[in-house]
Image (tube, coloured by chain):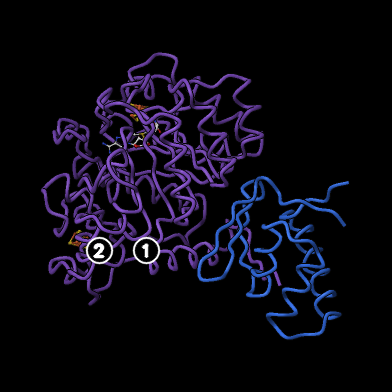
Amino acid sequence: MVESRLNEKEDYSVWQELRSKAKEELIPMIITLELTYRCNLRCKHCYVEFDKGGEELTISELDGLLDELKEMGTFLLILTGGEIFLREDIKDILIMIKQKGFAQRIFSNGTLFDNSWYDFFDDLQPERFEISMYGSNPEVHDSITGKAGSFERTANAVRELSSRGHEVVVKTVWMKDNYRDFVNWMNMVEELTEAVPLWTSIIAPLDNGSFSNRKYILTNEQIKELRDTQLEYFKNKYGEEYKIDDSTPCDIQIPSIPCSAGFSYAGISPDGCVYPCIQIRLKAGNIREESFRKIWNDSKIMNFIRDLSNNPIDECSKCMYNKKCMRCPGISWLESGSLSVANWQFCRQVRI
Amino acid sequence: MKYKINPDAVYREINGVYYVLLPRDKTIHRFTDVGSLIWRLIDKNFSESEIIKEVVNQYDVEEEVVLNDLENFIKELVEKKILLKIE
Ligand SMILES: C[S@@+](CC[C@H](N)C(=O)[O-])C[C@H]1O[C@@H](n2cnc3c(N)ncnc32)[C@H](O)[C@@H]1O
Ligand code: SF4
Ligand code: SF4
């Protein structure tokens, strides 16, 4: 009667079924909670508007919000910032989330943990940790985070969490300062944890609308160099069979919103603003003024996003790379103010 | 047998079907319709005899069949660590 499937790593079918049902039924299954815009690091590329999170939701406001989310079927909370471990009440928040029966995924730079934290996490059992590392050594990593000693602390966190059996995804953003470190970084991740590494070379503009971090984005030549290094690396690792799929012309309608934003996913800022996604900063409402349920069901923005999903983008629908393109409407929005356009960072990535 | 729901288990119902995630084991499970009904009752702290009565009512089956099914179901839940035995 259980009809259970899977070790999630091997078989995503149940998880995917859950996600697609949630999307059909407009259940806000995954919510990103940004708990603070404070941070102890100052990563060069970071989109966060430091210290501009307004008055952070208190634990009792979060308590009410979580009850509502539970009632509406939210399953997984992604906790991010800023650096959430700067919140004095973070332990109580994490315990409350667990007691209310949510899965929690923790995004962190890992620099603020000591031994008592690791024991705490063993009881908490988050669904996963995602920790950012920008290089395989202190020179590269610390020059991006702006803080001497951050590499050692973060590497230690990844090692410790992983050795205690937690799933730890190590993430990075490839930019001018670190893309030549790819192979060493991969080897480091393999040494530190069994989890799959995750990376992007797409850099989002800042939340305040400025694109001052644009200067860190790889040039075409650098993207190509990185891609060649990656191909070589994977070939060495997996043998000649490893290939990057070559695109074929395909005639499918590419909607403006290809993802779950506004359908089964939303983001909430430290001061309670609700967005379809933390990259689509169109404010749908604030939970201090009305209930999340009302914002989710009735707000103009959420319904606008849902309507847009029927609205195909001509350029992308005709594009021969659209099957493998991971275009994020949030990045289009941040860069051009429209959700329904192609974006150069994605366009050149698939073509190079 | 006495048991309790694993405090790490995260579960939600969509259209009458329960999905259960166990973060420690990185597994996610889907229950069948009857499994989901039983889980709903376990979650509401129904006793074994109350659960049997409810399933008999809803599915129009013999009590003995349900008893047997329920035992197997609970055994499976314990094996999968979704339920934990208590003394
Ligand atoms: C904003 S951080 C917050 C969580 C935590 N402080 C950390 O560093 O992982 C979440 C992730 O967003 C990434 N990120 C920050 N700014 C970005 C940008 N402009 N473009 C793409 N990714 C970015 C970070 O590298 C990090 O992996
Ligand atoms: S640690 Fe995270 S939030 Fe802080 S500056 Fe770096 S990327 Fe941004
Ligand atoms: S490559 Fe560019 S045009 Fe093609 S699907 Fe991606 S964003 Fe659209």
The part of the image, by quadrant, that contains residue A182 is top left
Q: Position of residue A347 (x, y in %)?
A: 19, 56
Query: Do callouts 1 and 2 mark residues in contact (Cβ within 8 Å)?
Result: yes
Taking A221 as reference, is A237 left or right?
right
Colour in which the image shows chain A: purple
Chain identifier, colour blue: B
Residue in the picture at 30% in, 33% down: A271
Q: Which residue is mark 2?
A: A306
The quadrant in which the C terminus of chain A is found is bottom left
The one of A92 and A328 positioned closer to us in this rendering: A92
Asked if badges 1 and 2 are on one and the same chain, I answer: yes
| Cβ of mark 1 under 8 A from ligand 3 | no
Q: In this picture, is B79 found above or below A79?
A: below
Q: Chain of mark 2?
A: A
Q: Chain of mark 1?
A: A
Q: Which residue is mark 1?
A: A26
- What is the crowding at mark 1: few (fewer than 14 residues within 10 Å), some, or many (at least 20)? some
On residue A165, the disc is none
Distance Cα–Cα, label 1 vs label 2: 10 Å
Q: Secondary structure at mark 2?
A: helix
| Quarter of the render that holds ligand 3 | bottom left
